[in-house]
Image (tube, helix red, strand yellow):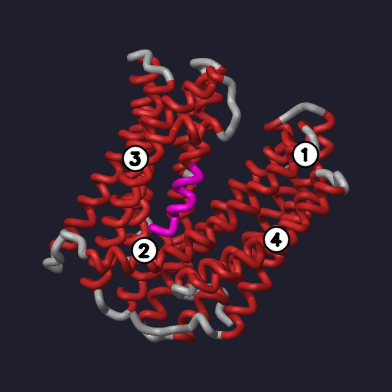
Amino acid sequence: MQLWTNTDRELLALAVPTFATLISEPLLVLADTAFIGHVGSTSLAGLGLGGNVLGVITGLCVFLAYSTTSVVARKIGAGDGAGAFRAGRDGMALGLVVGLVLAGLVVWLAPTIIGWYHPTPEVSVQAVTYLRIVVLGLPFQLVVLASTGLLRGMQDARTPLYVAIGVNLANIALDAVLIYGLGLGIRGSATATATAQVCSCLVLVAVIARRASGDAIPLLPQLHGMVEAMAHGGWLVVRSAGLWISLTAMTVVATHLGPQVLAANQVVNSVWAFIVFTLDALAIACQALIGRQLGAGDVQGAKTVMYRALGWGCVQAVIVGAALIVARSLIIGLFTTDPELMALLTDALVVLAFLQPLGSAVFVLDGVLIGAGDTRYLALAGLIVVCAHLPMLGLVDHYNAGLVWLWIAYGGFLLARGVTLALRTRSGGWLKVGA
């Protein structure tokens, strides 16, 4: 067995720049947080609530990137470059329509949505102000998701990376000018973020339009293509909703376990969220390569991608797991000096370290099935997994079991996902070839 193959080269060529692109979004949020943090705690709290709402919306709309990646990759594999561009174009149009509808609803319902969090009146005003402005960039942000999916499906992960870097630099510059220079406070932060999203959208659309012009592909989208894009993505929305339900339920249980556990859980969540970027980068590389191989009718090639990705996932799990155990004191010190919190986190990070192999396998196999377009199975299996996870959380809540058992229950969630994914990949039902 070869230690280094062309499949490995392709996986890493997609995964590394994708990882850098994925972390650009939290860096953008971090920049906003840093600037607004110097304005005042009320504005910072408002930014947190408004940002959470926007995060949930974009999380549910990530299907625009995932489904577009798999569809475009299949068509590229089948030699249908023009069809790939048309599928991407229609996905981008769908993103624009969905974004306009959602933006309108959020602007209208912003006070009601923020009211669900029960903030103080002062924080509510700041959150509503931020949300109503920043959501104006949502249509452009969703077009960016679909555009990124199109480029990844074409095996190009570098262009989205370059654009993401530009967005971050533009956002930081605009934050400085609007928040401090013009004294706009949280309105300046929202305006900067929305403007940066508009700029990234225009750049990506221009790049894609230029590439499409070489094949004389009309830029006007087709309704049936948009409907197909919605059909492909609908099951992914259900899958994403299931994930959000489990994660939200964990936060609810952590709240019931007391403020110390809730605070510690936030730290573990933050560490896990960063690790997820490394896992998701490999999964997205699988989406692009699996779609291309199946589009070309190369079943063995698709299996090879899966096996090599699982191998890289194991390497990744060992490195990340070992780093968590060895450096856990340093990691904890970045977040807190409270002795009680430090004790809670020390044990919880060990649990998180031992979950890495399972997490890597789950993300890789999830990416494999998304790339294969097996989204209906993912959605239905995801609902089963949620039904298995919620009783585990109920037991942790009932027995007041603490943070470690909360994350052991999350391990049960990952195990349930792993079982459903392994059963499907082993069955071969996902190996459907052609565009």
Q: Mark 4 or mark 1, which is nearer to you?
A: 1
Q: Is residue 388 left or right of residue 422?
A: right
Q: Is residue 8 visible?
A: no
**Which amino acid does the dot numbered 1 rest on?**
His
Quarter of the figure with the N terminus: bottom right
Question: Is residue 8 or residue 219 the one in the foreground?
Answer: 219
Confirm whether residue 341 shows in the render. yes
In 3D space, how far apart are the residues under numbered discs 4 and 1 (Cα atoms)? 20 Å
- Give neighbour class at mark 4: few <14, some 14-19, many 20+ (Cα, 10 Å): many
Q: Amino acid at mark 2?
A: Met
Residue at the image position 69 percent from the left and 62 percent from the top: 387
Q: Which residue is mark 1?
A: 256
Q: Position of residue 308 (x, y in %)?
A: 55, 74
Q: Is residue 346 left or right of residue 9?
A: right
User: Counting residues from the N terminus, which is met first, the one under dot 2 or under dot 3?
Assistant: 3
Q: Quadrant of residue 225?
A: bottom left
Task: Give the quadrant of the C terminus.
Answer: bottom left
Comparing marks 2 and 3, which lies closer to the viewer? 3
Q: What residue range appears in magenta?
A: 55-64
Choose the circle earlier in sequence order: 4 or 1.
Answer: 1
Q: Report, in whole angstroms, how far the alpha carbon at label 4 lies from the one at label 3.
A: 35 Å
Looking at the picture, tell me which residue is in the foreground, 133 or 333: 133
Residue 163 location in percent, x, y? 33, 46
Give the tally of numbered discs.
Answer: 4
